[in-house]
Amino acid sequence: MSTFEQLGLSPETLQAIYKLGFEEPTPIQKKAIPLALQGVDLIGQAPTGTGKTAAFGLPIIERIEPDSDQIQGLVVVPTRELAIQVAEELNKIGEFKRVRTLPIYGGQDMTRQIKLLKKRPQIVVGTPGRLMDHMRRRTIRLQNISIVVLDEADEMLNMGFVEDIKYILSDLPENRQTLLFSASITKAVENMSQHF
Ligand code: ADP
Ligand code: MG
């Protein structure tokens, strides 16, 4: 499979890819997208800069029900910068399917974030601490999550987020799909993946 058309994506999503200017899927995208679209759990390893965001972003967008206003997709990332960057790419990929993605991260005003969550995003991209904050305050509803992504898993574990990630995963529906992406598969990442 060497083109985006062959990966099983919808016309709306293909349109978004063309607008982004992507001509050909990267190796991790060729491998991960067809599998993720089938709904299986997977671990994706590829170096930085090889298009891992779209490798999970395209299947997430495809699996969102755009007519539902529940949060159905969750992406957990290590840093605020990454939350903003990943949400921006997901909003571009989801433009024609009209899927709304919201980044939430520490340092941003809580009242403003709660207001934005009330606007019913279908995907949330968040850092672990702030996600847990919203979970404890019950300002985020994770009962309808059908797909969760741990992005930069190696970085998150390096930063000491292992217990936070377990806490977040333990609160999600058990029948969800789980994707883990990482530049390196360390022992800690392997242990983490046992928790799927
Ligand atoms: P990673 O998460 O693997 O470090 P990113 O997902 O951030 O990499 O992608 C790196 C850059 O490559 C981004 O600017 C992204 O928009 C671009 N990109 C991703 N996939 C493709 C593609 N198939 N064709 C061209 N550019 C791409
Ligand atoms: Mg990345």
Image: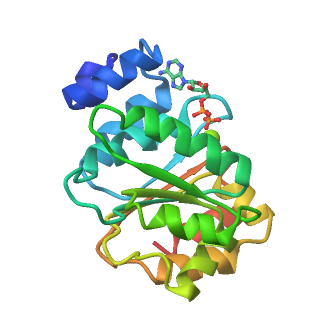
Left/right of residue 20 with respect to residue 154 in the rendered view: left
Q: Quadrant of the N terminus?
A: top left
Foreground: 20 or 42? Answer: 20
- Up-down: is 124 above or below 176? above
Q: Is residue 173 above or below residue 31?
A: below
Is residue 55 in view?
Answer: no
Image coords of residue 84 (percent x, y):
63, 46
Q: Seen from this angle, which residue lies furthest right?
A: 159
Q: Is residue 78 left or right of residue 169?
A: right
Location of residue 175 by image quarter: bottom left
Q: Picture coordinates of residue 6 (x, y %)?
A: 24, 22
In the rendered picture of this protein, how many numbered marks are placed on residues? 0
| Residue found at x 70% / y 66% | 109
Q: Which residue is located at x 49 percent, y 85 percent?
A: 138
Here the colouring is rainbow
Look at the image and tell me whether residue 164 can be seen. Answer: yes
Give coordinates of residue 13: x percent, y percent: 29, 30
Please state the horizontal and vertical placement of residue 194, each as a whole percent of the image.
Answer: 52, 73
Seen from the viewer's position, the closer of residues 59 and 11 is: 11
Q: Quadrant of the C terminus?
A: bottom left
Classify residue 30 by image quadrant. Answer: top left
Residue toward you, 53 or 121: 121
Residue in the image at 45% along x and 39% along y: 91
Q: Nearer the viewer, residue 63 or 187?
A: 63
Q: Is 166 left or right of 157, judged from the image as shown?
A: left
Ligand 2 shows up in the quarter that is top right
